[in-house]
Amino acid sequence: MDDVDVRLAVHDLQQRVAALEAQIAAFTGMPVPTPSVPSAPPGGPETDPEVLEMLRSGNEIGAIKAWRERTGLGLAEAKFAVDQARAKLT
């Protein structure tokens, strides 16, 4: 499964969860909770100025941490994305 397939699978699952939450809200009369995960800048970590600065200064761990905070990704996913961005810099 490549990165595009993973993103499509995640998007599909997000839509399914949203539909289920809407059904539950309609059934119970309770509001649907809003997600607390901030949205990532478009284009990935290679377009995020803070992440790029950390990569350029050799702070890969800081870059991964910053990308995780922005996206809500897990450690492995954020590391993969930051590694891809670092590879584009060199």
Image (cartoon, rainbow, N blue to C red):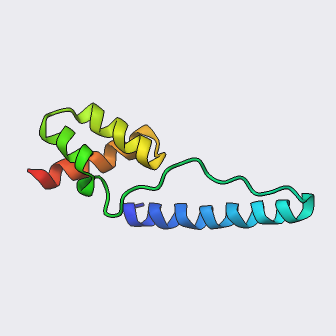
Give left or right: position of 44 versus 19. left
Q: Nearer the viewer, residue 59 or 10?
A: 59
Q: Nearer the viewer, residue 63 or 7?
A: 63
Q: Nearer the viewer, residue 59 or 29?
A: 29
Q: Quadrant of residue 64?
A: top left
The single residue placed furthest to the right in the displayed view is: 28
Give left or right: position of 77 versus 50. right
Give left or right: position of 38 versus 42. right
Point 69% across, 63% down: residue? 18
Point 46% across, 46% down: residue? 73
Point 8% across, 50% down: residue? 90
Give the image location of residue 15, x and y in percent.
63, 67
Give the image location of residue 1, x and y in percent.
42, 60
Total count of labels: 0
Q: Is residue 8 above or below residue 73?
A: below
Q: Quadrant of residue 53?
A: top left
Give the image location of residue 60, x and y in percent.
23, 35
For residue 80, say whether it is visible.
Answer: yes
For residue 2, say whether it is visible.
Answer: no
